[in-house]
């Protein structure tokens, strides 16, 4: 029997790269995170409403699982709260899985006395410099860092070179570089000043300068509720070469990557004042211990959620809805590892044909293979952010390393005709 008959409200939607328009896939189809969440809400008897600034940007692909589209300024909690008056019946939850709108959703939830992270927490400020300052205030080990305006006429690193430069409010690896000199910094600043975030979000136009760290990039995936941190597992990354460090693969398993990992995650979440909701906490494991990269107050991105389902047997969306609606969360079991390997174009031009998807998914361990783009789309072999992926491979193995090897073997079956 349904647990609720009220509304769960989404503030904007977390979709797949390129909107996930393509239907070129084999094996298990990867669906957008928001669709999985909308469907999970529906299974609990909830009605679904989505507050958006631009209805047309989503097309009609979610109309079958959205009961009400609410058009408003989604960058302002007062506007979102006001438009919710159009809904008749109890509002059970208000949240967002889109980084730029988590704080707005939290403010709205607080106004309605619903569950959500505290609105003033450093973890949802959408400002990496605020998060760094919070770590310092909590006395946790951190890195050397500094902030400058991208509009500074004499822009240079305040911490010396080499350094990592990124927008304080960036996403999707946009405008992230390894800088060796002033010229590189000014080039990335010029590129960032032309960047539009969309959905009415105004970039702060401030750059964060960070110490270069050596070690693997990892993340903890989980939920926090009433002070209890529940870690689903940990992911590590395969990254492209400097200067952009784009993720080429994400490898997930339940086991902790080092002794004390769970304690580190719990302490960091507390320092960032993040006390409710899903989390994707990224850190680099240095020889001196873990150092924070960033907190994303949401589930891990896009297809990785689907990949996690392959080894836990429970969609992360079901866990999320259980937490939001205060219903029992399903149990998780995981004895294997899974890799999401991101496919990138081998050449630039127009994608005319793709072959080998069916062969890829019959390879050992492969569960899914597909594209985020369609035939006729322009693709680029120059990958500077994760918004330029063209597809995915999911493969399961007994370890992170084995699942990655199997994913690469499956991907070798795929061929592209690009003109």
Image (cartoon, rainbow, N blue to C red):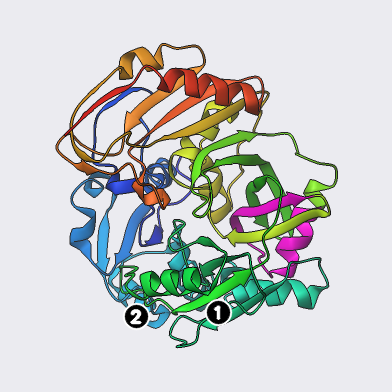
User: Residue at the spot x=48%, y=18% of the render?
Assistant: 409
Query: Residue 237 location in percent, x, y?
Result: 59, 41
Total of numbered circles in the picture? 2
Q: Is residue 136 magenta?
A: no
Question: Considering only vertical position in the picture, is 336 above or below 66?
Answer: above
* Front-most of residues 290 and 265: 290
305 to 267, vertically: above or below: above
The image shows residue 398, relative to residue 17, as above or below, that is above
Residue tagged 2: 79
Q: Residue at x 32, y 59 (%)?
A: 49
**Residue tagged 1:** 156
Magenta part of the chain: 264-286
Q: 268 or 89: which is nearer to us?
A: 268
- Gap between marks 2 and 1, in whole Å? 39 Å
Decide: is 408 above or below 106: above
Residue 188 appearing in the image: yes
What is the x, y in percent for residue 55? 21, 62
Q: Residue lying farthest bottom?
A: 153
Residue 391, picture quadrant: top left
> Which of the numbered marks, if any, corresponds to residue 179?
none
**Residue pictured at 44% horizontal, 56% vertical:** 172
**Upstream in sequence: badge 2 or badge 1:** 2
Q: Is residue 271 magenta?
A: yes
Task: Residue 43: name its quadrant.
Answer: top left
């Amino acid at each position: 029997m349904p647990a609720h008959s009220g509304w769960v409200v989404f503030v904007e939607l977390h979709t797949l790269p390129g909107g996930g328009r393509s239907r070129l896939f084999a094996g298990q189809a990867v669906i957008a995170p928001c669709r999985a969440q909308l469907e999970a809400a529906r299974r609990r008897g909830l009605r679904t409403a989505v507050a958006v600034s631009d209805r047309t940007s989503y097309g009609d692909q979610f109309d079958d699982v959205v009961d009400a589209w609410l058009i408003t300024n989604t960058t302002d909690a007062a506007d979102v709260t006001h438009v919710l008056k159009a809904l008749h019946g109890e509002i059970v939850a208000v949240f967002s899985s889109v980084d730029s709108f988590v704080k707005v959703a939290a403010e709205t939830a607080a106004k309605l006395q619903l569950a959500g992270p505290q609105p003033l927490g450093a973890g949802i400020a959408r400002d990496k410099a605020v998060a760094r300052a919070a770590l310092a205030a909590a006395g946790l080990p951190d890195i050397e860092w500094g902030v400058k305006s991208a509009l500074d006429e004499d822009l240079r690193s305040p911490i010396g070179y080499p350094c990592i430069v990124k927008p304080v409010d960036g996403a999707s690896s946009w405008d992230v570089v390894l800088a060796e000199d002033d010229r590189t910094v000014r080039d990335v600043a010029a590129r960032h000043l032309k960047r539009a975030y969309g959905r009415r979000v105004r970039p702060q136009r401030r750059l964060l300068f960070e110490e270069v760290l050596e070690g693997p990039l990892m993340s903890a995936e989980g939920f926090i509720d009433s002070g209890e941190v529940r870690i689903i597992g940990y992911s590590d990354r395969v990254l492209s070469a400097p200067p952009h460090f784009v993720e080429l693969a994400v490898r997930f398993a339940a086991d902790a990557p080092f002794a004390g990992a769970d304690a580190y995650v719990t302490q960091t979440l507390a320092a960032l004042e993040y006390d409710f909701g899903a989390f994707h906490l990224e850190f680099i494991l240095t020889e001196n211990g873990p150092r924070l990269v960033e907190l994303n107050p949401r589930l891990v991105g896009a297809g990785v959620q689907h990949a996690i389902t392959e080894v836990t047997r429970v969609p992360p969306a079901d866990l999320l809805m259980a937490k939001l609606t205060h219903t029992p969360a399903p149990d998780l079991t995981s004895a294997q590892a899974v890799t999401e390997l991101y496919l990138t174009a081998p050449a630039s031009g127009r994608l005319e044909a793709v072959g080998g998807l069916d062969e890829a998914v019959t390879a050992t361990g492969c569960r899914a293979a597909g594209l985020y783009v369609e035939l006729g789309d322009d693709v680029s072999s120059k990958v500077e952010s994760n918004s330029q992926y063209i597809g995915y491979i999911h493969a399961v193995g007994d370890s992170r390393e084995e699942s990655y090897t199997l994913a690469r073997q499956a991907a070798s079956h795929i061929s592209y005709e690009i003109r």
